[in-house]
Amino acid sequence: MLTRKYRWIGCDILNQQSIVTQLAAKRGIDIYISKDMIRDPFEIKDMKKAVQRIKKAIDEGEKIAVYGDYDVDGITSTAILYKALKGLSADVMYYIPDRLDEGYGLNIDAVKYLIDCGVKLIITVDCGVTALDEIKYANDCGIDVIVTDHHTCGPVLPPAYCIVNPKREDDISPFKLYAGAGIAFKLSMALGYSVDDFIQYAVLGTVSDIVPLVGENRIIAKLGLEKINERSDPGITALIEVCGITGDVKSEDIGYKIGPRLNAAGRMSTPELGLKLLLTENKNEAIDIAKELNRLNSQRQYIENEIYSEAVNMVESEMLPDVLVLAKEGWHEGVIGIVASKLANVYNRPCIVISLSGDIGKGSCRSIKYFNIYEALKVCEPYLEKYGGHDMAAGLTIKAENIDVFKKQINLYAQNILKPEHKTPEIYIDMVLPEEYYLIDTAEELSLLEPYGIGNQKPVFLCKDLTVSDVRNVGDDRHLRLKLYSSKGREINAVGFNMGSLINDIKQGDCIDVVCNLEINKWNDENNLQFNLIDVRYSKRQITNLYNKYLNTFKRVILRSEFSPKHVKISDIKAKKIEEALLPALLKEYNNLIIVYSFRQLINFIRKFGELSENIGLCFEVIDDERKNILLVNPDYTLLDFSRFHNIIFLNLPVDIENLKDIMNVMDFNVFFIDDPCHVLLYSEDVCDMIPTRSDFEDVYICIKECGKEISSKRLIQMLNKNPLKIDLCTQIFRELGLIKVTEKDDGIYYAINQVGKVNLNNSRLYMKLLKVRNIASDFLMSKNIV
């Protein structure tokens, strides 16, 4: 059953000649970048004061410590400032806290260690703006602290010698969104270095810390990538080689390949390993360190996959809650944050993954757009030892005995915050792409918007009403490859990574709308346009095709000679009433056959249970799908094998019971009826749309008569603008009563008046059958369940 994975939002119309110009204007970014666009570092408050204190320390031979952080932003920030100070002949050392033993930021034990090392000036990078107690302690010991940071400031600033952070309330500099490496880079420029000296490290921290790639961050990213692609830095070049990157490095390569390997040092070993890679000038040493980082990253991936698999099994073993809270003894603390992020993305729920060590658990929290995880933790504060973070990510410490009640309370809180639509992920679509832009030239022009990242995402397009000419799986059936044709016959290749399961729902000849990125696929020295699929839905044309299929199968149901409509009670099919909310649990656990007789019901079901669509096959009349759950429309019970199903679920009671009763008496399965007046209403509305009234008979007869000699069925439908099945049934009854003559020709069916005069519609067996179906539907509408 093909349904969208995402809620589609945005979607502009192209109103300029250039797609790139329109996108750049809306995003507020410059297309063309140059070095002179880097702003004066002294615009940032306290930058001058920091430079003066650093130069004083160098002149007087004071020992300086650069205090960093264990993630990529912290490592690259440390590398920039350490190299800058070394180049100025400073007596400098660095210190990076251990992720597991010390945690983030300044700590008093580390300050004591630095004092013992003879340090007189501490410069923090990527941390320090909330370290009030630690900086006060340093001051009391006669140590000056310069804070360089990019994180949000607390209500009180620490008593540092100076604080270089554009997010200070009293800082009037125009750009506030730097990463820690961006601030360190600006400080290096203030110390007299050029843009080219350290920008290759600044881009690593900027992209890896997922700050918006707009304003000066975009300039740092673009110029930094150009510098990296010169392959002049031995450490970065060695890392590029072990990553297997052969062409130019792009921002995606930093985010998904280079960054994780630098991060692996802090997660699995010592963060100093990543820093040493950036500091070394020896190519052989760089290669050895890069290989070790690659090994650590593989180890991290293995542990991460193990924890993720265990966590998924926990999630799948119960009803999906609003907030996932998962805990287990021995889960690696350095990896649980990544696992929480993956789970939050897959299930589109806030996720908290807790590593237990005896009676205490340490957890990483990741959230979704509409749920402030920090506020949720604040509400649950009585059950936590400590916590901290922001709206999308946080950390906590909790006693093992409090986990169950914490899980209950945070989900109670979420019930009042999260609406059903919030649990469906969103995809922002930049624009509907006109067919004339399905060109490789378009993809090449879009490269002017690179580098991509937060605030300047890879453009996402909606391409409408494409016909599928070929569909197949690739890559061990994990991926999907489509050949598509536009309405004007333009051929496009499309790939859906990790969308292989859609092969069950997309067939040759289907008409689809796709959400995608444009890509240049290079193969055998040829460049071709490729759509990289993000999401797929049936186009309006395909919905019309499905409706016509529905009408045809409904027609066959009522035209069967054995079809005998009657009022049916739940007891007739030995069904149990259940609430619709129980459906997801049944669909997850058992093989189910869900039976519908209404197109409106079908569309309603797809909208409500789209997230389960991968495991539901959509069939009409007969079952031609092997999935465990089948949504069957207008079934022919004489052709069905029920033996594979554990449950039969009716969305409304069938009107034809005789064949079904015989099956019910011999088969061993549960029968359920969804007790929801909405389903009855939808079915009844469909029946009233399709079954003709006396007024419809008059309109059809008069139209045929007034057209003279003969009229085609296509023309008749166009003139009357009625449901095509309704017109078809009228002509069937007229033919049965001898009122019209029906002729089949190569170009369609034609009708002509056969006799003029009054006839009694009640003499038609088909009419009496339809009248009974319509009366049953009308009774449903008037029943107390609807009223």
Image (tube, grey):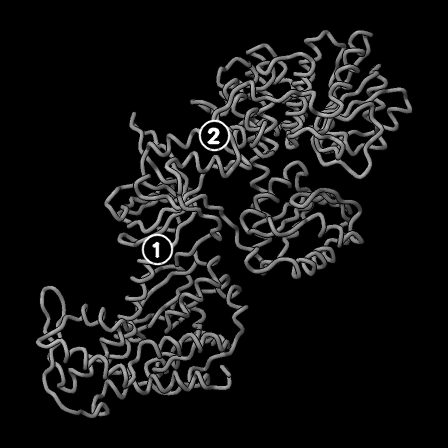
Q: Is residue 659 above or below residue 133?
A: below
Q: CA distance from mark 1 to mark 2?
A: 31 Å
Question: On the image, numbered disc 1 is attached to which residue?
Answer: 539
Question: Which residue in the rendered view is the most extreme toward the right?
Answer: 140
- Residue at left offset 26%, top offset 83%: 562
- Indicate which disc, 1 or 2, sits on the residue closer to the N terminus: 2
Quadrant of residue 14 within the rendered picture: top left
Q: Position of residue 588 (x, y in %)?
A: 50, 61
Q: Is residue 301 left or right of residue 781?
A: right
- Callout 2: few (<14), some (14-19), or many (20+) C-alpha neighbours within 10 Å? some
Q: Position of residue 319 (x, y in %)?
A: 58, 61
Callout 1 crowding tier (Cα within 10 Å): few <14, some 14–19, many ≥20: some
Circle 1: element type? loop
| Residue kind at label 1, given as amino acid type | Ser
Q: Position of residue 169 (x, y in %)?
A: 75, 35
The residue that appears at 39% across and 50% down in the rendered structure is 536
Q: Which mark is residue 450?
A: 2
Q: Does residue 246 appear to the left or right of 214 in the view shown? A: left
Going by the numbered disc 2, the residue's amino acid type is Glu
Determine the residue positioned at 24% across, 73% down.
720
- Quadrant into which the N terminus falls: bottom left
